[in-house]
Image: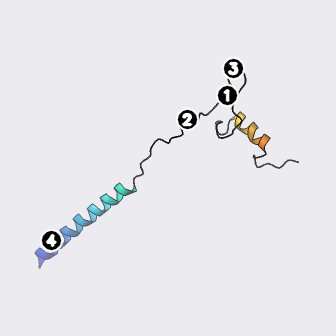
Amino acid sequence: MTKITTGLAAFLAIAISTSIASASEKSKKKYEKSDNSAERTYVRPDANGWYPRDTRLLKFGSQLWWEQMEREGRTGRRDW
C-alpha cells in the first residue's frame, strides 16, 4: 500500500510540475516589431519650418502635438 501511495504521490508531483511549466510557457507574450516603420514621428520642424499636421505622426505630448490638438479642438478643454 505504501508503494502505491508513494508512486501516486510521485506521479502527481510530476504531473503538477509539468502542467505549471506548460502554463507559464503559454502565458508568455511574444512581441513582434509592428509594420508601422514607414510612419515617422516628428519631434521638431525641419529647416523650412515644415512638419506634418497629423497628430498621429507627431511625438505624443510634444509642444507641436498640443498645438495641433488645440487647433483641432481635441484637448478636452472647453472654449470659453
Dot 3 corresponds to which residue?
47
Q: Nearer the viewer, mark 2 or mark 4?
A: 2
Q: Nearer the viewer, residue 20 or 37?
A: 37
Residue occupying the far bottom of the picture? 1
From mark 2 to mark 4, how far is it between C-alphas? 60 Å
**Residue 38, image x and y in percent?**
55, 35
Quadrant placement of the N terminus: bottom left
Q: Residues within 10 Å of mark 3 (few under 14, many from 20)?
A: few
Dot 2 corresponds to which residue?
38
Dot 1 corresponds to which residue?
44
Question: Given the image, on which type of amino acid does mark 4 rest?
Answer: Gly
**Residue 19, image x and y in percent?**
30, 63
**Nearest to N terminus: mark 4 or mark 1:** 4
Q: Residues within 10 Å of mark 4 (few under 14, many from 20)?
A: few
In the displayed structure image, the side of residue 35 where residue 74 appears, left or right: right
- The quarter holding residue 10 reads bottom left
Question: Given the image, on which type of amino acid does mark 2 rest?
Answer: Ala
Dot 4 corresponds to which residue?
7
Q: Nearer the viewer, mark 3 or mark 4?
A: 3
Q: Nearer the viewer, residue 1 or 15?
A: 15
Q: In the picture shown, does residue 68 fall above or below 11? A: above
